[in-house]
Image (cartoon, rainbow, N blue to C red):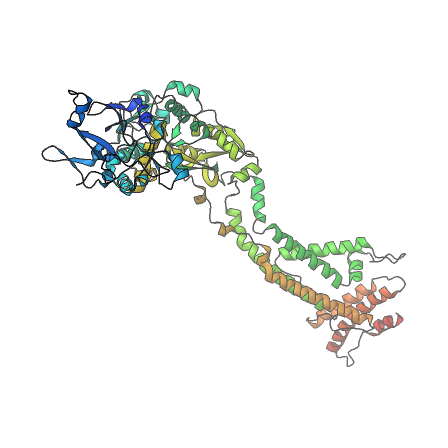
């Protein structure tokens, strides 16, 4: 295979890039990386392209698209003029000369060009990105050999050398050998903040799982291995790195850091990473502003939802709550509608009745003052109150009055009122039993509701800054120490009314879940804050380790969530159900009756009321026109003969007992209306008695009418 470039001129010079994006000399920049200095096979000073090699000369990638290589040994026996006799030079691609991955070993032990490594034959050089962006259209990339952590900025371009970067990009994406240059087979020491079975834990000498309460001397003994979800997850990441991550060992946090951060063992462990005591920390670490100011973090592993944890609804019930259940089948709007219908029906009944006779009979009072002839409001009010109470009793008894001799207007009114009572009482009774027997389920399940009710919320001190910024009006109580366990203790001691807890850690901590059961606490869906969980790590390792975390998720289906789902942990059974949505009964069983549900009975009642009003107005109009009676005003008589006679006597008695003042036009109207009703009854009774004329008992009424 031809390994020289066609760009080489006959004079042996190499192409230096397109105008506007020329190759630069990066020798001085590379020589500044003293921690990566090395000696090439030819004995000159070089630079390690990765932490593990290979060693390339400082002129690597500099000055031109191809690099000059000298064959033979230099001698100076005859002086400078004899050099041309003892060596020859040629131009080669930078990678072809110094990237050992471009070659494979043959049977005779000599390296042979690997024809699959097509990127080795592509021309490129280091360039100035500022100039290229401004003065050319060449594609420029930052060198992965000398990344951000190297404190130097080196950029390369294939297109300025009339070449393509496609082969290199494809090789970098698909071939795992190139990825070994990310971390270079690093060994990582990681600290663990605390025992949280099944997240991370140790076992005692008896093989029993240890939790936070069981942390003892074995926590500081690195010979005792860690187990758990996170340990298994890290092991899977190490496997797919193919040696780029040599191993991850676990150790304890320092006592000094826990003195500095007494409220959070996790923040104390982050401090250990910041102080350089360990390379990384493994566990469910929230990314917070305070922690980011100390160290870098990997990419997020999972997002933790911090939600409200509240007392289980129904575990406490006051007398007032039990009393209120009687009213719960209806909404307040429905109760207002019922009250309005009763009042409306009562007022119409007073209007339709013979108020003067009724007032005289019941209270011994006239509707008008005998001296001033003015209406007595007190008597009218008493009539209205009696009618309201009467209609209310009919409603509560689920029936209407069976008034003998009621007018047609009254019957229409009672017909509509009776249908309304039928529907409303049936709906109320159908729902009442369910509401009376259910547990009290009124609760605050959102942060907005907690703020409005001024509830005290116990929260983790590690999230203090984030919570205060997100919800400045909330009344958070940050526990002194102990994390979630300290928050539960504060709740039990009455220091707060509810808690703010992250679901990811707490729902996998079985001991913590049982603590919630003991305190009658349940999780809600009321989101307070969503926070990323990641590993705190040294800055120079953050990018490389994050690469493998992302590679595991995207290419190998290795994620923390899957590790949680697949972990087999011999665990005790949780004592109760800590989810609110499974504690409550479906809300459809407790839907309240709303006014719209009573549309039909209300419309029928109003229709009957309108018809009754129209009939009564028509009756009054006929009486004022001088008519003795009207079909609308006649009393409905569907009674046996003896009852009819009794009613006639009662009406006559009521009429005679009323002592009217000197007649005026209003009194005449009243007497005309009364005489009309008496005429209707008398006519019917006389017909039943055999009176041929059917006018018995009407003479006095006619006289009274005439006198008016």
Tell me where residue 570 appears, x and y as whole percent. Answer: 30, 35
Quadrant location of the N terminus?
A: top left
Q: From the viewer's perspective, is 588 left or right of 18? A: right
Residue 529 is left or right of residue 83, and the answer is right
Nearer to us in this view, 111 or 285: 111
Q: Nearer the viewer, residue 601 or 189?
A: 189
Residue 342, by quadrant, is bottom right
**At 68% across and 71% down in the image, what residue appears?**
638
Between residues 516 and 472, which one lies in front from this camera angle? Answer: 472
Indicate left or right for 646 with 550 as reference. Answer: right
Q: Residue lying farthest front?
A: 81
The answer to whether residue 317 is seen in the rendering is: no
Name the residue at 19% across, 38% down.
3
| Residue 505 in the image, given as x and y percentages of width and height | 39, 34
| Residue 383 in picture, x, y percent from top left | 76, 56
Vertical side of 10 occupied by 41: above or below? above
Above/below status of 270 relative to 333: above
Residue lying at 36% horizontally and 20% vertically, measured from the top left: 254
């Amino acid at each position: 295979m031809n390994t020289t470039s066609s760009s080489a001129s006959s004079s042996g010079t190499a192409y230096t890039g397109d105008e506007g994006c020329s190759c630069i000399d990066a020798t001085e920049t590379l020589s500044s990386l003293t921690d990566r200095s090395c000696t090439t096979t030819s004995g000159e000073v070089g630079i390690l392209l990765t932490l593990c090699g290979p060693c390339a000369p400082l002129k690597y990638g500099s000055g031109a698209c191809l690099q000059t290589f000298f064959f033979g040994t230099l001698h100076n026996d005859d002086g400078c003029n004899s050099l041309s006799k003892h060596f020859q030079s040629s131009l080669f691609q930078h990678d072809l000369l110094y990237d050992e991955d471009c070659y494979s070993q043959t049977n005779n032990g000599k390296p042979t060009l690997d024809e699959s490594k097509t990127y080795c034959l592509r021309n490129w050089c280091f360039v100035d990105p500022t100039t290229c962006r401004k003065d050319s259209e060449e594609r420029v990339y930052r060198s992965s050999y000398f990344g951000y952590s190297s404190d130097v900025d080196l950029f390369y371009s294939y297109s300025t050398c009339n070449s393509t970067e496609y082969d290199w990009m494809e090789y970098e994406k698909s071939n795992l050998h190139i990825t070994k240059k990310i971390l270079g087979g690093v060994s990582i020491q990681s600290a663990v903040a605390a025992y949280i079975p099944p997240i991370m834990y140790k076992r005692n000498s008896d093989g029993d799982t240890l939790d936070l309460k069981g942390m003892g001397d074995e926590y500081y003994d690195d010979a005792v291995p860690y187990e758990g979800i996170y340990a298994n997850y890290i092991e899977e990441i190490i496997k797919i790195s193919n040696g780029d991550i040599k191993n991850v060992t676990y150790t304890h946090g320092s006592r000094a850091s826990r003195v500095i951060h007494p409220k959070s063992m996790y923040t104390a462990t982050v401090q250990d990473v910041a102080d350089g005591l360990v390379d990384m920390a493994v566990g469910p670490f929230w990314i917070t502003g305070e922690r980011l100011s100390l160290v870098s973090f990997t990419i997020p592993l999972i997002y933790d939802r911090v939600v409200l944890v509240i007392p289980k609804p129904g575990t406490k019930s006051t007398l007032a709550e039990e009393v209120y259940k009687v009213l719960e089948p209806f909404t307040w709007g429905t109760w207002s509608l019922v009250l309005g219908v009763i009042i409306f029906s009562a007022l119409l009944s007073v209007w339709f009745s013979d108020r003067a006779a009724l007032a005289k009979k019941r209270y011994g009072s006239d509707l008008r003052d005998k001296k001033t002839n003015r209406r007595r409001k007190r008597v009218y009010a008493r009539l209205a109150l009696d009618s309201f109470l009467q209609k209310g009793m009919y409603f509560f008894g689920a029936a209407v009055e069976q008034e003998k001799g009621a007018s047609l207007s009254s019957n229409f009114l009672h017909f509509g009122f009776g249908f309304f009572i039928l529907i409303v009482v049936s709906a109320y009774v159908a729902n009442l039993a369910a509401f009376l027997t259910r547990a009290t389920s009124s609760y605050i399940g959102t942060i907005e509701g907690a703020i409005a009710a001024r509830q005290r919320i116990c929260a983790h001190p590690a999230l203090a800054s984030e919570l205060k910024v997100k919800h400045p009006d909330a009344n958070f109580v940050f526990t002194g120490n102990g994390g979630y366990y300290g928050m539960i203790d504060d709740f039990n001691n009455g220091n707060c009314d509810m808690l703010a807890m992250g679901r990811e850690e707490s729902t996998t901590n079985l001991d913590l879940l049982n603590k919630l059961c003991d305190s009658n606490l349940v999780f809600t869906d009321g989101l307070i804050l969503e926070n990323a969980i990641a590993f705190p790590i040294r800055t120079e390792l953050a990018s490389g380790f994050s690469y493998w975390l992302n590679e595991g998720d995207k290419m190998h289906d290795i994620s923390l969530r899957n590790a949680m789902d697949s972990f087999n942990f011999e665990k005790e059974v949780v004592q109760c159900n800590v989810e609110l949505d499974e504690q409550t009964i479906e809300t459809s069983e407790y839907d309240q009756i709303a006014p719209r549900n009573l549309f039909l009975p209300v419309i029928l009642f109003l229709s009957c009321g309108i018809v009754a009003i129209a009939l009564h107005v028509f009756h009054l109009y006929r009486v004022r026109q001088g008519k003795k009676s009207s079909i609308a005003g006649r009393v409905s008589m569907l009674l046996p003969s003896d009852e009819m006679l009794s009613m006639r006597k009662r009406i006559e008695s009521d009429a005679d007992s009323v002592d009217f003042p000197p007649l005026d036009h209003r009194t005449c109207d009243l007497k005309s209306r009364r005489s009309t009703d008496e005429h209707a009854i008398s006519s019917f009774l006389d017909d039943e008695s055999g009176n041929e004329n059917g006018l018995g008992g009407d003479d006095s009424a006619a006289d009274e009418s005439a006198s008016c």
